[in-house]
Amino acid sequence: MEQLVNLENILNKIPVWEGISVADFGSGSGIFTIELAKKLNNNGHILAIDILEKPLAFLIENAKRQNVAHLINTKICDLENKTLGRDLQSGFDMVTAINMLFQVKDKENVVKEAKRVLKDNGFLVVVDWEIYKIPMTENLYPVNKKELVKNVEKIGFELKEEVRVSNTHFGLIFTKK
């Protein structure tokens, strides 16, 4: 079965994996979180963040089966309306937002929180639906890629690379200025 998104295409563009810390925004049940954990080779950690508790519990159970649970901590947080807390200021090498922004009305707050928790020169990795391919239902907020790039750059990031991840999704790698 073909994957909806080939995460490897974008993750292979990240130059360093050894010992990095990752904040996975909107991790849900952790399909991508677990793939990120496998890239860490038992040296580093991931904070999986979601607004709902149930998917995070499923994530940890699945991570145990994949032998990567020791690399993952979870946190329930509404990133659209709250911060992760003062103790995480400039604490991460990378923030990922994989299939998350199309579910968020106030994308600016999420990007500002990514900037706040990233170390200088840290990476923001965004993968989301192409606007014309998104399955339209209520409570979705499609992402216009050009607008997103412009707004993320205004907040203090630089677009490093656009990466093809599928026919339905785009991938963007930003660095914190």
Image (cartoon, rainbow, N blue to C red):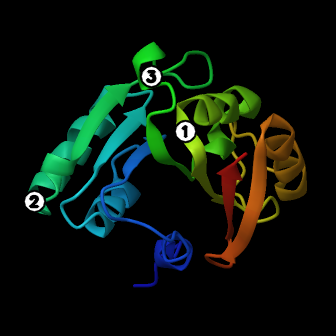
Q: Which mark is residue 118?
A: 1
Crowd class of label 1 (few under 14; some 14 to 19; many from 20; radius 10 Å)? many
Q: Please give the name of the residue rendered at 55% of the width and 39% of the height, measured from the top-left corner.
A: 118
Q: Secondary structure at mark 1?
A: strand
Q: Residues within 10 Å of mark 3 (few under 14, many from 20)?
A: some
Q: Is residue 142 visible?
A: no
In percent of width and height, residue 127 lies at 62, 59
Quick one: label 3 or label 2, which is nearer the N terminus? 2
User: How far is disc 3 from disc 2 in space, using C-alphas?
Assistant: 25 Å
Q: Which residue is mark 2?
A: 65
Q: Is residue 22 left or right of residue 130?
A: left
Query: Where is residue 126, by image quadrant?
Result: bottom right
Which mark is first along the chain, 1 or 2? 2
- Above or below 163: residue 28: above
Q: Which residue is mark 3?
A: 77
- Image quarter in which the C terminus is found: top right
- Mark 2 residue crowding within 10 angstroms, few (<14) / some (14–19) / many (20+): few
140 up-or-down from 40: above or below? above
Judge by depth and name the residue closer to the eye, 86 or 147: 86
